[in-house]
Image (cartoon, rainbow, N blue to C red):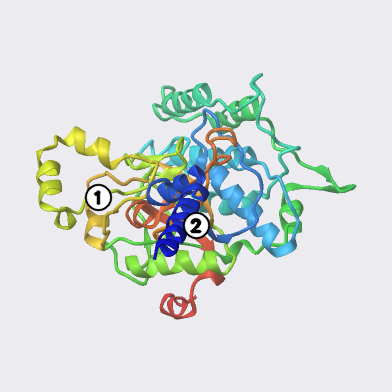
Amino acid sequence: MKALTKLLLLALTTAFFNFTPGQILAQDDADTAYIFETVVEIPVTTVKDQHRSGTCWSFAGISFVEAEVLRVTGKVTDLSEMFIVRNAYSVKGLKYVRMHGSSNFGPGGQGHDVINVMAEYGIAPESVYAGLEIGEDKHNHGELDAVLQGFLDAVIKKRAGKLSPKWFEAYNAILDIYLGPIPASFEDDGNVVNPITYAESLEIKLDDYIEITSYSCYPYFEAVNLEIPDNWSDDVYYNLPLGYMMEVINYALEEGYTICWDGDVSDRGFSHRNGIAILPEKKVESLSGTERERWEKLTSTEKGKELYVFEKPGEEKDVDEAMRQEHFDNYTSTDDHLMHLTGIMEDQHGTRYYVTKNSWDDDSNDKGGYLYMSASYVKLNTVAVMIHKDAVPEKIAEKLGL
């Protein structure tokens, strides 16, 4: 009996001293800090920097196009975001004047603007058209945006009794000064090409891209004119129930298609610095009596501090169509930013996150300029997505007539 006791004590002592602090920390981390596992990782191009310009739509759209070229041809490209911006501004300014100033004018846009410009005007590499003409190393459009707005507002006042036939030429001259003239031709791999022929050489079919949204104020499974300011071109989006939209997002990524994402990042749960976007909620019914009592005594500020901690997983809100519609109607979810969804991660509790490529430079956080948006965050704050039509599951594609 004494021998057995000694053996037991020896085993316990050995186990204790072999259980290192690192193992204890690892167990503690499993209960606290985020631990992510890669589910889907799609090859894409490098993170860029929109800097002080309202051109996230062009950066997200071009990143998406570059990923499509990579998927289709295997070629790595570096396309010009400012080529798209320059041409879009020209078209947008013309519409603003024709609409007597009643249409939306500003630096914002949508993913389809990238596709529309490429279809009409082509594209150029970044090395050919960088859009940096005013002595800056990075994009800074504060003055440009103000000058363009002021010029167009002066034009529509028709102080000479009618519009000058030269106003549009003068407007484009401003764009040329700030962003650079559009190149008529340039060299690519030893061949002289123009923007149209260069776009064709990328081997993607621009008609194959569609946009999807999900709001109950529009008929489902129909193409609708999404009423958001940056849809200045009045393009149409396919409107799906929330569950179907999320099915499309998941299917697309799982099948190797990236997604151009348009949504809201003003939500308190969005933290690019921490590389996380979440929609936290404390489910009171799951708390014990003392925990519930303590929680209910906290102020709104104190509750917020406990909820919005970007260091460990927690409970998140259950999002439904009614919640989405309410946030759309009361302006708490708006189309204020576009980014690029490039993969899927899961945390240690099985919660899904979407790997998101931002355009705030690769040194903007410790994830190389990426962040992970939780499924709940995406459900609530997605305004629209742009995808290849083949990235839509067959049963949904049939309902949409694709």
Residue under label 1: 281
Position of residue 90 relative to residue 142, above or below, is below
Residue count near mark 2 (Cα–Cα under 10 Å), binned few <14, some 14–19, many ≥20: many
Residue under label 2: 345
Looking at the rendered structure, the secondary structure element under dot 2 is: strand
Does residue 341 appear left or right of residue 191 in this picture?
left
Q: Residue 48, position in %: x, y?
A: 61, 38
Say which amino acid is labelled 2.
Met
Say which amino acid is labelled 1.
Glu
Q: Is residue 103 visible?
A: no
Q: Residue 112, position in %: x, y?
A: 52, 53
Q: Residue 229, position in %: x, y?
A: 37, 44
Looking at the rendered structure, the secondary structure element under dot 1 is: loop
Query: Which label belongs to residue 314?
Result: none
Q: Is residue 141 visible?
A: yes
Does residue 115 appear left or right of residue 214 in this picture?
right
Q: Residue at x 36, y 48 (%)?
A: 278
